[in-house]
């Protein structure tokens, strides 16, 4: 379970990304961009999650059609497989990324904070896996590893976010498209929390940017990357300052 995962060796040099001040807070770990979000509304009815997890004082889980491993939370329409072909690509400074959004709900936790202690993303041709046995390096045998927040195991690298409830999203994770094996069919996102800040008070849910969305106006709720000098609007396909664009839009987030 979580305790077993967190007992693995730690990375040599820790990186902590603190997003609790809200936009435009951001940072990078192992090639991924993590940015604060204040997107509203973000409740289940409008958020369309592919993964929901709830546990205390630690929690972990991943999306699958095979059931509810670890701390996955039913029903299956909120926790299910995700087609790689459905993901929208975002170009940031010439690099293409897939975008995942975290909506954390830890209303009982002091200061309403949540720590993303592990994030592993896989591609696979099996969308119904249920393994709960970790490899010696802290990964799971879920397919081809596309991203790992903490290579080698441990929780030295982590992302700290707010967790004000399911009405507001808290974090965007941009993962390079080049890390994903495009010949695989599904994307599996595993995450764990509870080492740096104990979990309590609600569930976490993940959404992916998929398909073709309307083009919204840029608002103060957009993600602002100060160090890149650009703005990414949620679901947007417009060019902003010539720096951000959606380069591919595909439909159908499920099988």
Image (spheres, rainbow, N blue to C red):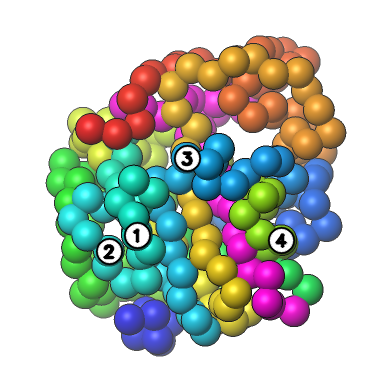
Dot 2 surroundings within 10 Å: few (below 14), some, or many (20 or more)?
many
Distance Cα–Cα, label 4 vs label 2:
25 Å
- In the picture, the disc for residue 7 is none
Seen at 22% across and 60% down, the residue is: 67
The residue shown at (16%, 41%) is 125
Q: Tell me where residue 196 appears, x and y as whole percent.
A: 61, 80
Secondary structure at badge 2 equals loop
C-alpha distance separating marks 2 and 3: 18 Å
Towards the viewer: 103 or 191: 103
Q: Are marks 4 and 1 in contact (CB under 8 Å)?
A: no
Contact between labelled residues 2 and 4, with CB atoms less than 8 Å apart: no
Look at the numbered disc 1 and give the secondary structure of its residue. Answer: loop
Give the mark nearer the N terminus: 2 vs 1.
2
Residue in view at x 41 percent, y 29 percent: 87
Q: How many marks?
A: 4
Q: Is residue 171 visible?
A: no
Q: Nearer the viewer, residue 135 or 2?
A: 2
Residue denoted by label 2: 68
Mark 2 or mark 3: name the one nearer the start of the chain.
Answer: 3
Taking the image as shown, residue 13 lies to the left or right of residue 154, namely right
Say whether marks 2 and 1 touch (CB < 8 Å).
yes
**Location of mark 3 (residue):** 48
Q: Which dot marks residue 164?
A: 4
Residue for point 40% across, 34% down: 178
27 horizontally vs 126: left or right? right
**C-alpha distance separating marks 4 and 1:** 21 Å
Q: Does residue 52 appear left or right of residue 141 in this picture?
A: right
Q: Comparing marks 2 and 1, which lies closer to the viewer? A: 1
Start-end of magenta stretch = 85-110
Residue at disc 4, secondary structure? loop
């Amino acid at each position: 379970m979580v305790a077993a995962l967190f007992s693995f060796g730690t990375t040599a040099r820790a990186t902590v990304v603190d997003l609790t001040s809200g936009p435009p807070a951001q940072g990078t770990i192992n090639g991924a961009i993590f940015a604060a979000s204040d997107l509203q509304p973000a409740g289940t009815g409008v958020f369309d999650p592919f993964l929901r997890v709830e546990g205390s004082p630690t929690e972990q889980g991943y999306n699958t059609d095979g059931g509810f491993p670890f701390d996955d939370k039913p029903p299956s329409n909120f926790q299910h497989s995700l087609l790689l072909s459905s993901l929208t690509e975002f170009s940031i400074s010439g690099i293409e990324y897939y975008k995942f959004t975290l909506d954390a709900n830890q209303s009982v936790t002091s200061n309403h904070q949540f720590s993303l202690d592990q994030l592993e993303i896989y591609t696979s041709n099996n969308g119904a896996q249920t393994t709960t046995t970790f490899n010696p390096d802290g990964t799971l045998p879920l397919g081809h590893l596309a991203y790992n927040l903490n290579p080698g195991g441990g929780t030295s690298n982590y992302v700290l976010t707010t967790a004000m409830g399911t009405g507001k999203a808290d974090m965007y994770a941009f993962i390079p498209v080049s890390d994903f094996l495009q010949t695989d069919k599904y994307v599996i996102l595993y995450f764990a929390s509870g080492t740096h800040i104990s979990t309590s008070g609600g569930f976490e849910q993940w959404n992916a940017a998929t398909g073709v969305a309307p083009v919204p106006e840029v608002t103060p709720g957009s993600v602002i990357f100060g160090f890149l000098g650009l703005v990414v609007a949620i679901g947007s396909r417009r060019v902003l300052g010539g720096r951000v664009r959606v380069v591919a839009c595909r439909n159908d987030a499920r099988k």
